[in-house]
C-alpha cells in the first residue's frame, strides 16, 4: 500500500492564487481529511493529487515516486467526485464493472470482482437496478464501489456524503469508517463538515484561503487550536471568543477577572477562547462564578445549548451536557472552567504557548 505526498503545492488560475505553498503527506493506510470552508481550495488540492489538475508549483509523490507529470490514468488513484456521477443508463453491476472493462479484464474476472465489491458495500441484492431506482446512500455506495473495484493504492473522496440527507449521512459516516478500516486503503478525504472530519479521520488538515492553518489528530486540533480561525471552525456550537486584557497572570474581560497561572510575566491585549462546554450551570474543579441571565435555550435531548447575557460583558454560549429544565429569563450564577481558557494573540490570532499549571 502506498502513501501520497503533496509537496509545497501552489496553484494559480490566471491572477488568482488558490493554493499557497501547501504540503500534505498521507502515510500508507492513513485516513487524512482536508477540512475547510467553501472555496478554500479543497477540491483543487484533491484534483492535483489525482492528476486532473496541474500544480503551478510543487510536486506530487505516490509511494515515494514523483508523479507530477503523470496523467490521472497512470497514477493508480481512485476518485469519488463531489457530485458522484453514476452512469444513469447502466445498472449497478455495469457501473461497478466499468473501470475494469476499460482495463479490458476477462469477463469472468470482472463478474467475480463486481460480486466481491457489491458484498463489501452491501449492495449484492441490487446489482440489476439503475441509479434512479436507488436511494441517495445506495448511490453513494455504488460510487465508492466503483472507485475501489480496481484495488487502487489510494482513494480520494471529495465530499462524498454532502448530497445525502442528515440522518442517512450519520449512518453512512459510520459505515464508511468500517469499510475503509476493513480495506486498509490510503485515503485523502475532503469535507467542509467538521463533525465528519473529527469522526472519520486519523489526521485533519485545516485549510483556509488556500493555506494550511493546522495539521493534527482530531483531538489535538480540538484541544489545542493553533489560531482563532481553527478554534472557531472546529467545534459546535462555536468557541466563544472575547476581547480581553492580560495583566500579571489575570485575564480581564470588562469587569470579569479570571486568574491564570503560567503567564505571570506577560501582559497585553488578547483574545480569550472558551468552549461552550466550559460554560455551565454546575461547578468545575477550577472555576469562577458569574451572574448571568438565560436568553435562549436550544434543547438537544441529550443536553442543551444555553445562550447567556452577562452584566457588562458580551453574550456567551454554554453547553449543558445533560438536559435541563432551565428556561429563558432564569437568573443566577453560571460557572466558567478556568482549565478551558485559551488565549490567542489580539492581532495575529495565533495561540499563545500552552498554559500548563494554571491557577
Ligand atoms: N478552473 C478555475 N478557474 C478559476 N478559478 C477556479 C477554478 N477552479 C477553482 N477556482 C477557484 O479556486 C477557489 C478554490 O476552489 P475549490 O473548488 O478548490 O474550493 P473548495 O474548497 O473545494 O470549495 P467547496 O467546499 O465549495 O467545494 C475558489 O475560489 C474557486 O472559485
Ligand atoms: Mg469542493
Image: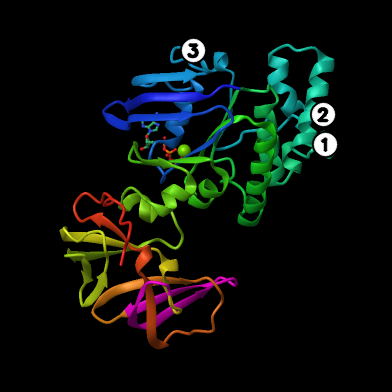
x and y percent of residue 77 in the render?
Answer: 57, 22
Question: Residue, x 29% and y 31% (percent of image)?
Answer: 17
Residue indicated by mark 1: 124
x and y percent of residue 190 in the render?
Answer: 50, 39
Residue indicated by mark 2: 115
Can see residue 206? no
3D distance between C-alphas at marks 1 and 2: 7 Å
- Whether ligand 2 has any atom under 8 Å from the Cβ at mark 1 is answered as no
Q: Earlier in the sequence, mark 1 or mark 2?
A: 2
Whether 286 is among the magenta residues is yes
> Of helix, strand and loop, which one carries label 2?
helix
Q: Which residues are magenta?
A: 284-309
Q: Earlier in the sequence, mark 1 or mark 3?
A: 3
Which residue is at the front of the view, 273 or 137? 273
Badge 1 vs badge 2, beta-carbon distance below 8 Å: yes
x and y percent of residue 317 in the render?
Answer: 39, 71
Image quarter of residue 216: top left
Which residue is at the front of the view, 152 or 47? 152
Residue indicated by mark 3: 70
Amino acid at each position: 500500500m502506498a502513501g501520497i505526498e503533496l509537496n509545497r503545492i501552489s496553484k494559480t488560475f490566471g491572477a488568482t492564487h488558490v493554493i499557497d505553498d501547501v504540503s500534505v503527506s498521507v502515510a500508507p493506510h492513513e485516513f487524512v481529511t482536508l477540512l475547510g470552508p467553501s472555496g478554500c481550495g479543497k477540491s483543487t488540492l484533491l484534483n492535483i493529487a489525482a492528476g486532473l489538475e496541474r500544480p503551478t508549483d510543487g510536486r506530487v509523490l505516490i509511494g515515494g515516486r514523483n508523479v507530477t507529470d503523470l496523467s490521472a490514468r497512470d497514477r493508480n488513484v481512485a476518485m469519488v467526485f463531489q457530485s458522484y456521477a453514476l452512469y444513469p443508463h447502466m445498472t449497478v453491476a455495469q457501473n461497478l464493472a466499468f473501470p475494469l472493462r476499460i482495463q479490458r479484464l476477462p469477463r469472468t474476472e470482472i463478474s467475480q470482482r463486481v460480486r466481491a465489491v457489491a458484498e463489501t458495500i452491501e449492495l449484492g441484492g441490487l446489482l440489476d437496478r439503475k441509479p434512479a431506482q436507488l436511494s441517495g446512500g445506495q448511490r453513494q455506495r455504488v460510487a465508492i464501489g466503483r472507485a475501489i473495484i480496481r484495488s487502487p493504492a489510494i482513494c480520494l473522496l471529495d465530499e462524498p456524503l454532502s448530497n445525502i440527507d442528515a440522518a442517512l449521512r450519520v449512518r453512512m459516516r459510520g459505515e464508511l469508517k468500517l469499510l475503509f478500516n476493513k480495506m486498509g486503503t490510503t485515503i485523502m478525504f475532503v469535507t467542509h463538515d467538521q463533525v465528519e472530519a473529527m469522526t472519520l479521520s486519523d489526521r485533519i488538515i485545516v485549510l483556509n484561503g488556500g493555506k494550511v492553518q493546522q495539521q493534527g489528530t482530531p483531538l489535538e486540533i480540538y484541544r489545542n487550536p493553533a489560531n482563532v480561525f481553527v478554534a472557531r471552525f472546529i467545534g459546535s456550537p462555536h468557541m466563544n471568543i472575547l476581547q480581553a486584557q492580560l495583566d500579571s497572570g489575570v485575564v480581564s474581560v470588562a469587569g470579569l477577572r479570571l486568574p491564570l497561572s503560567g503567564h505571570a510575566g506577560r501582559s497585553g491585549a488578547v483574545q480569550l477562547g472558551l468552549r461552550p462546554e466550559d460554560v455551565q450551570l454546575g461547578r468545575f474543579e477550577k472555576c469562577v462564578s458569574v451572574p448571568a441571565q438565560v436568553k435562549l435555550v436550544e434543547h438537544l435531548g441529550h443536553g442543551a445549548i444555553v445562550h447567556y447575557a452577562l452584566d457588562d460583558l458580551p453574550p456567551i454560549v454554554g453547553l449543558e451536557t445533560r438536559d435541563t429544565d432551565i428556561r429563558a429569563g432564569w437568573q443566577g450564577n453560571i460557572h466558567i472552567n478556568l482549565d478551558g481558557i485559551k488565549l490567542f494573540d489580539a492581532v495575529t490570532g495565533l495561540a499563545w504557548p500552552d498554559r500548563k499549571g494554571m491557577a
